[in-house]
Amino acid sequence: MRRAPAAGPMPQKLRYGIVGLGWIGMVHAEAIQTAVPDAEIAAVCDIQPERLAERATKLGVARRYEDFRKLVRSGGLDAVYVCVPNHLHREVALAALEAGLHVFCEKPMAMNAAQAREMGGAAARAKKVLQLGMMSRQRPECRLVRSYIEEGFFGTIYRVNVVLRRRRGVPGLGGWFTTKEKSGGGCLIDIGVHFLDLALWLTDKWAPTSVSAADYQVFGRRMRDYRFVDMWAGPPDYSGVCDVDDSASAFVRFPDRATMSLDVSWALNARDETYIEILGEKAGVRLMDDGALTLLTEMDGRLVDVVPQYAKDAKPYHAQARNFAAALRGTEQPAATAEQGVAVMELVDAIYRSSAEGREVAIR
């Protein structure tokens, strides 16, 4: 397997900068400080002065910046974690790569495939690692199922069903999550990319050929009438806007006649439901639904359910942080590469385009 492109010898202790100290930035900071003894957070950046001061102090980091450009040019860093709103991913990543730094970028890779390709091209030219924050790949049940697939246990995989429904899960109504010019889209580009990436990675089907899709803006158009129990990234800001999709569905085709269905929502009058279902000629499985992992197959002429035993206490963000450090040192491949990120964004673009045009569209 091709190793990560580490330019020159890595220092004994990797030095990271984190741009964005919101919830996800602090999740990554905790993973680095807890699970990666050969790395340290050397600098942090956030545009909110009070949050910057409070959280930098909590992390024990003295170098603090309100402008990411100053951070990436400050010297003494090996890599940058990009943990800012979607519309800034490209700008921060390109600035870090231009400064000679490796990059870990939270999902989605960018606002669209064109931006993603630009980022991937910049990383390739700089010979730097650009790893994406698709932490679900690190879940132990996902890695186990992938190993079964690679070993041929499932045979030919011909159908994949992706369901990620939230009855009421619009994040930060009226904020950047629901503002298209800052997010690039709604539930599809926010939570849908996690499962699209996971489905493509599990099955190794990275070249879909066409998609027929529809996305919907139902609840966000009536912001003050939106009823919810709790709200991540809340409370609502009714002075803002919600001009993005709150649910989407798609039917994707692949070159080998395999298909994938997608049903994703932030808000829907339906029960919460989460799973990826992989159906092969020899076996099938449903995972990510918090139930017991069960492989449905045949054995000795009988239908059987196989319930594998595996360690379940792994922490995905910790495993992801360890992998990024190993990728910088050239001992492992990045868990989620720029090329794969481009493929996911091309599929997201195609889903939005199919919905806008009301027809099936070709991909690539």
Image: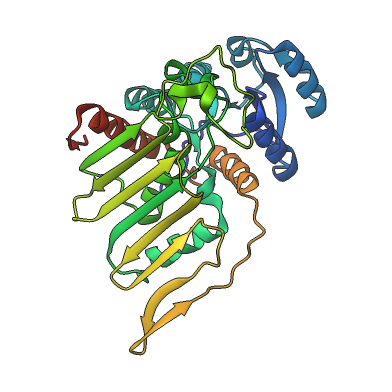
User: In front here: 32 or 111?
Assistant: 111
Picture residue at 29% right of the left edge, 59% below the top: 159
Tell me if residue 146 comes above or below residue 229 in the rendering: below
Q: Is residue 93 visible?
A: no
Left-right relation of 345 to 313? left
Picture residue at 46% right of the left edge, 25% below the top: 220
Q: Position of residue 352 (x, y in %)?
A: 30, 30
Q: Position of residue 247 (x, y in %)?
A: 40, 36
Q: Is residue 191 visible?
A: yes
Image quarter for residue 48?
Answer: top right
Picture residue at 59% right of the left edge, 68% below the top: 310
Left-right relation of 17 to 202? right
Left-right relation of 117 to 133? left
Q: How many marks?
A: 0
Work out which quarter of the rendered image holds the C terminus and state it: top left
Q: Position of residue 298 (x, y in %)?
A: 36, 81
Image quarter for residue 47?
Answer: top right
Which residue extends farthest front? 225
